[in-house]
Structures are given as structure tokens and as C-alpha cells.
Amino acid sequence: MKMNVTFLGTGTSQGVPVIACDCEVCRSNDKHDKRLRASILIETENGVAIVIDAGPDFRQQMLRAKLCHLDGILLTHEHKDHIAGLDDVRAFNYITGNAVKIYLEERVQAALHQEFGYAFAEYKYPGVPEFNLQTIDERPFQVAGVEIIPIRVMHYRLPILAFRIGKFAYVTDANYIDAASKEKLRGLDVLVVNAVRFKKHLSHYSVPEAIALAEELKPAAAYLTHLSHQIGIHRTVQEKLPPTVQLAYDGLVLSVS
């Protein structure tokens, strides 16, 4: 199955530039150093469109991608930088007349009920977002005929999901993957993995750790995402990476078979 993967955002929870920060990265005029919150868009050759995570920049990302059709949103976990933009699915509700399918674990559903209580109220205010919640776990499932393989990874002490589609996998907000999950990440053409900075982090892979993971799993290519301003200037960092590892950037489109 051929598909295009667009990086809608490649930044951390604060994005880049960071509010009130005067560091070299936040002052950079290079478009590669402008990072919205982490999210990707997957578009298959059959016209299926799937978004992974919908953070605070969701509206801007949808407008920039000119996306007019959405088959579903996969949520990796419930942190605000991955769900805060869900209110803006109202636009898709209005255009299609249907609730947007959201694929998520039961624990994440509880967070949505808390954060978007008005969307689940008995008496709803007109125009609130309409969610069609689809419960998932670690078993494979389908979105509009596209098979998705959830993969358990750890975000410090929080169990979250990575996702594999064909020979592409997306691993964000993780700093530990056990042996069984690593087996599900072998044989990839493209691995996308978080790497927040060079220095070790409590709940995310560092750049050296992400490189080591890629060397262990041996995908044809690896792309680093969820990058903070602490990582440094894109151009300079890219020069330090192995040939098969690249920094992702907002707007980058990959063609995956």
C-alpha cells in the first residue's frame, strides 16, 4: 500500500519557538526550526486520510495541509499537547454531517470526558464537537480498510501507544520499548521516533538513545520528531547524524510503499 506521510508538527509540548525564549533556535529564521506540536497525516493512494494526535495546533495544521476529508484520528495518549485541538473537529462535523472517529484506549477516553465534558453532556450546546469514540487496545484494527497495528511503549511510567501501518511506524513520547514491542518494529522502511534533545530526558528518548534504537531495529530510514528548542539548529544537528537518520521538520512529506 502506497501512502504519503506529512509531518504536521515536529515540536515538543511548547512548540518552537518557545514563548518568551530568546535562544538561538527560537530566534532562527530557518523554516526547519519552526515546529508546531507533534502530529502526522497519513494519506493512502485510495484517498484514506488519518491523523495521529491532535494537539493545540490542530486547526492550523489542518488549514496548512488543506485537508478537507478525515477518516479518523489516532491518539497515542492523553497529554494536552496530543489532544487539546480536538474541539476543532467541529469543522469536519459541519462539512460531513458526521461525528469524527477517534481511536483511543479506554484510559484516554476518560481524559477526553474530563477535558471536553461539554461534548458529552446530556444536553449539548449547539455546535459542540461530535466524537465517535472507537475503543482500541494492543490488537490490530482498521480505519477505512487500512490496518493499524498498535504497539505498547512507555512514556516514563505511562503506557502509551505507537502505531505501525505497513512498513511505516510512528513512535512519539517514549523512552522505553520492551523486547516484544521491538519485534513489532522490525522490517520497517521508515521509523519515526521522538528525540527531545541530546541530554538524557526523564520521559523521552534523547538523540543518542533514538539513534541507538534505530541502529538496533535497522529501518531503511529513521526520522526524529518531538524536537525541543534544546536540540539546536536544524542544519547544524543534521550534520551530526548518521546517514540513515534525519531530523523531521514541519511540512516534510515522505512517500512510503
Image: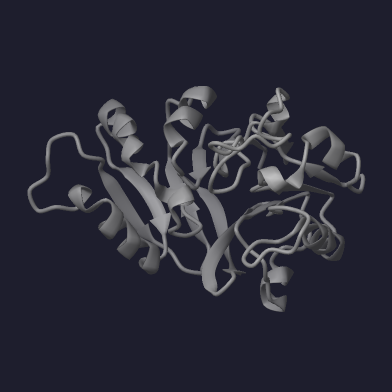
Q: 32 or 176, which lies in front?
A: 32
Quarter of the image that includes the C terminus: top right
Q: How is the image coloured?
A: one colour
Quarter of the image that includes the N terminus: top right
Residue at x-position 53% and y-position 66%: 160
Can residue 74 be seen by looking at this rendering? no
**x and y percent of residue 49 in the render?**
50, 37
**Which quarter of the figure has residue 185?**
bottom right
Horizontal side of 225 relative to 61 (left or right) equals right
Residue at x-position 66% and y-position 34%: 26
**x and y percent of residue 187 in the render?**
79, 59
Residue at x-position 81% and y-position 43%: 246
Residue at x-position 53% and y-position 71%: 159
Q: 189 or 113, which lies in front?
A: 113
**x and y percent of residue 5 in the render?**
64, 37
Can residue 16 be seen by looking at this rendering? yes
Q: Is residue 254 above or below residue 223?
A: above
**x and y percent of residue 122 in the render?**
9, 53
Horizontal side of 80 relative to 245 (left or right) equals left
The total number of labels drawn is: 0
- Identity of the residue furthest to the left in this view: 123
Horizontal side of 97 relative to 244 (left or right) equals left
